[in-house]
């Protein structure tokens, strides 16, 4: 009789997809609200988007327990920063803090794949995309999560960024106006939910511009 070994993992993947697009004076961050494990849907109403500062928002997919722990850690560090400096963190500062926080846990990582979006110090949209151990890149658009393999080729086709090797360096922001970017995000999620079983139920969009932050919702397929 062969010995059977019990396998236990500290991680799970709760699925879901996140997208962010930066424009000249806005940033759109979106994620679906389905949370799954295996073939089970745990809830259809889970927000993957977290407001970190007045002009900075993070969308996260992966293991949602680690995501929640990461959000609490960032909130605590941001509170300390506000007491010391008497102001909110800028988006580039929050981007570096997130990288440091993830890298600090690199030997037992937060199993979270994050997209950070917001406005930089000049009021221009910025999107930063991360891996689980804090390596990050500033881009014009990005996607993370279970549907990213379907979404990213579509965004590449519509918004192809200039190569980072081109000199002089080209601006990463996309040429779309805000309404076009919102329509594009709705289209990519409608497409991804057709093929990815972990993406669906509802789409939550957060739009950041000079006027502040607003949220929009769109229903996705529920099967």
Image: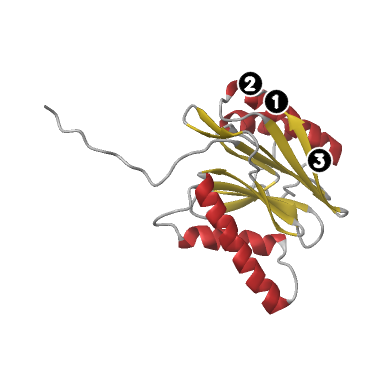
> Which scheme is used to colour this image of the protein?
secondary structure
Q: Is residue 50 left or right of residue 181?
A: left
Q: Is residue 217 left or right of residue 83?
A: right
Closest to the observer, 144 or 23: 144
Quarter of the image holding residue 155?
Answer: top right
Closest to the observer, 5 or 43: 43
Label 2: element kind: helix
Q: Is residue 28 left or right of residue 142?
A: right
Q: Mark 2 = which residue?
A: 194
Q: Residues within 10 Å of mark 3 (few under 14, many from 20)?
A: some
Give yes or no for contact between labels 3 and 2 (Cβ–Cβ under 8 Å): no
- Which residue is farthest right? 211
Label 3: element kind: loop
Q: Is residue 123 left or right of residue 156?
A: right
Q: Residue at x 60, y 51 (%)?
A: 137
Q: Residue at x 65, y 24 (%)?
A: 222
Closest to the observer, 98 or 86: 86
Q: Mark on residue 175?
A: 3
Give coordinates of residue 185: x percent, y percent: 74, 34
First in sequence: mark 3 vs mark 2: 3
Q: Residue at x 76, y 59 (%)?
A: 54
Label 1: element kind: helix
Give yes or no for contact between labels 1 and 2 (Cβ–Cβ under 8 Å): yes
Q: Residue at x 72, y 64 (%)?
A: 90
Quarter of the image with the N terminus is: top left
For the residues labelled 3 and 1, the Cα–Cα distance comes to: 22 Å
For the residues labelled 3 and 2, the Cα–Cα distance comes to: 28 Å
The total of numbered circles placed on residues is 3
Q: Mark 1 = which residue?
A: 190
Q: In the rendered image of this protein, does residue 45 appear above or below residue 66?
A: above
């Amino acid at each position: 009789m062969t010995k059977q070994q019990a396998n236990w993992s500290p991680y799970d993947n709760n699925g879901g997809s996140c997208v962010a697009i930066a424009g000249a004076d806005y940033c759109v961050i979106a994620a679906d609200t389905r949370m799954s494990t295996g073939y089970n849907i745990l809830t259809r109403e889970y927000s993957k988007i977290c407001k970190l500062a007045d002009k900075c928002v993070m969308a996260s997919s992966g293991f949602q327990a680690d995501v929640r722990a990461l959000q609490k850690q960032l909130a605590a560090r941001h509170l300390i920063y506000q007491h010391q400096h008497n102001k909110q963190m800028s988006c580039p500062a929050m981007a570096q803090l997130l990288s440091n926080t993830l890298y600090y846990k690199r030997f037992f990582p937060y199993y979270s794949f994050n997209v950070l979006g917001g406005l930089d110090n000049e009021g221009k949209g910025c999107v930063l995309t991360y891996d689980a151990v804090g390596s990050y890149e500033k881009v014009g658009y990005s996607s993370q999560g279970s549907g990213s393999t379907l979404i990213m080729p579509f965004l590449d086709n519509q918004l192809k960024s200039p190569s980072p090797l081109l000199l002089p360096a080209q601006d990463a922001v996309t040429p779309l106006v805000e309404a076009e970017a919102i329509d594009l995000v709705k289209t990519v999620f409608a497409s991804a939910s057709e093929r990815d079983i972990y993406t669906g139920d509802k789409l939550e969009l957060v739009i950041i511009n000079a006027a502040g932050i607003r949220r929009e919702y769109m229903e996705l397929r529920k099967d």
